Amino acid sequence: MAKSLQEHLVSTEGLARLAAHAHRLLVFQHTLETVLPEALRPHARVANFRLGKIFIHTSNSAVAAKVRQLGPRIATALTSSTAQVTEIGVSVQANPATQPKANDQRPVLPGNQQKQRLTLLAQNLPPESALKRAIERLIKVVTE
């Protein structure tokens, strides 16, 4: 009979420790989500646990500040779940998936009708008008 992935993970001592650690982190994450307000849950995640210190990554500094404020409550909840938590480390680790994407596309240029209206507007402005000079420069740029 074929072994499951879980059986393979716990069969070797090193992998068994790793699997146990990963399971503990999942339990911590679940507990953290029950303690945090709903608005903060998607923005905070348990990163690691070592020597009684739990490391929490947040998506921005505002969430990090709130998580630090809730530190004693979080520590109490996490301690009662699986292990003794003596310290909480919070750092900002922006999630690349939530980063705004760079807009590589060139903006849509005004069409003929918009160019005609800009030209008409520029013609109706006083000759010494700074707005007239700016519109004329704009027309020149979009027609090139």
Image (spheres, grey):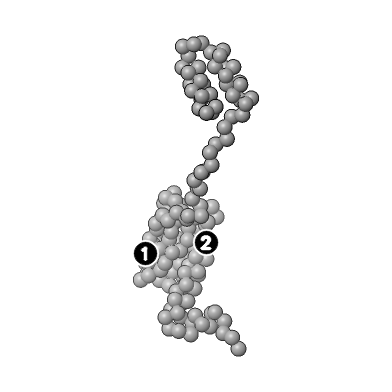
Name the kind of residue labelled 2 in the image: Glu
User: Where in the figure is residue 109, as x and y percent of width and height?
Assistant: 57, 32
- Residue ID at (42%, 50%): 61
Q: Which mark is residue 87?
A: 1
In this rendering, is residue 67 above or below 82? above
Determine crowd level at label 2: few under 14, some 14-19, many 20+ residues with C-alpha closer than 10 A: some
Q: Amino acid at mark 1?
A: Glu
Q: Secondary structure at mark 2?
A: helix
Compared to residue 59, the image places residue 18 above or below, namely below
Q: Residue at x 59, y 24 (%)?
A: 115
Where is residue 69 shown, x and y percent of the image? 42, 54
On the question of residue 76 being in view, the answer is no
Q: Which mark is residue 68?
A: none
Q: Residue at x 52, y 61 (%)?
A: 33
Residue closer to the observer: 142 or 75: 142
Q: Position of residue 75 (x, y in %)?
A: 42, 64
Q: Nearer the viewer, residue 10 or 143?
A: 143
The tally of labels here is 2
Which corner quadrant holds the N terminus?
bottom right
Please state which of residues 21 and 83 is positioned toward the viewer in this rendering. 21
Which image quadrant for residue 70?
bottom left
Circle on res. 33? 2
User: Residue at the front extreme?
Assistant: 144
Above or below: residue 16 compared with residue 36: below
Residue 98 image position (x, y, % from top left): 51, 52
**Residue 38 shows in the view:** yes
Q: Is residue 85 above or below residue 143?
A: below
Q: CA distance from mark 2 to mark 1?
A: 18 Å
| Crowding at mark 1 (Cα within 10 Å: few <14, some 14-19, many 20+) | some
Tell me the element at label 1.
Answer: strand
- Label 2 or label 1, whichever comes before in sequence order: 2
Which residue is found at the position 49% from the left and 50% from the top?
99
